[in-house]
Image (cartoon, rainbow, N blue to C red):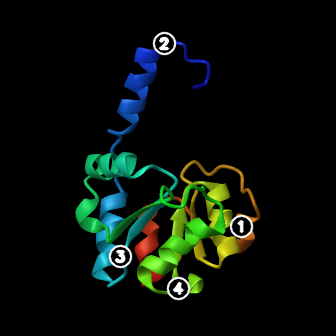
Amino acid sequence: MHGLADAALRADLLEAYRELGAYPDAAPALAALRAQGLGTAILSNGSPEMLDAAVAAGGLKPLLDAVLSVHPLRCFKPDPRVYALATARFDCQPHEVAFVSSNAWDAYGAMRHGFRVFWVNRAAGPVEYWLDETATIIPGLAALPALLA
């Protein structure tokens, strides 16, 4: 892993990753979306175990309808089969999904699948993958509920 030779340090770093808290705007945004009657989910390349730990550390479990992992598919985003997990879980069409990501490559993959995309560009970094033309760019999650009202 990135040239890290110390196995104990590597294990400690990977374990710390499982205990990261959520951004402060995550829980209020999810609560507002649920209050609007919208379904909420995480769609991740992470393993179910890693996602369970992350959701618990962030205190987000009661605010989510689903936590979807690529694990059963044995492929990763931006493979279209991954995005199809969301439409299957919520029994909807791609254009009915509001997909939110801070990863430009993920936002682009979701847009190619037909999702309505919101790219969270917290650091105001350069636009990639033509997201200024194909996505709604937001500085954080606080803006999201009003855009979906």
Mark 1 or mark 2, whichever is nearer to me:
2
The residue drawn where x is 60% and y is 69% is 81
CA distance for labels 2 and 4: 47 Å
Give the amino acid at mark 4.
Glu
Identify which residue, 81 or 117, lies in the foreground: 81
Which quarter of the picture shows residue 79? Answer: bottom right
Q: Earlier in the sequence, mark 1 or mark 2?
A: 2
Position in image of residue 45 (x %, y %)? 52, 53
* On-image quarter of the C terminus: bottom left
Residue 44 at x, y = what percent?
49, 57
Q: Which of the two residues, 63 or 120, is positioned nearer the viewer here?
A: 63
> Which residue is disc 4 drawn over?
96
The label shown at residue 33 is 3
Residue ID for mark 1: 132
Q: Amino acid at mark 3?
A: Leu
Circle 4 crowding by C-alpha within 10 Å: few under 14, some 14–19, many from 20:
few
In the rendered structure, which disc, 1 or 4, sits on the residue that comes first in sequence?
Answer: 4
Q: Confirm or deny contact between disc 1 and disc 4 (CB under 8 A).
A: no
Q: Which circle's residue, 2 or 3, is located before the other in the chain? A: 2
Q: Is residue 141 above or below residue 45?
A: below
Q: Give the CA distance from mark 1 to mark 2.
A: 42 Å
Residue tagged 2: 6
Image point 71% across, 51% down: which residue? 126
Number of numbered discs visible in the structure rendering? 4
Residue 60 appears left or right of 126: left
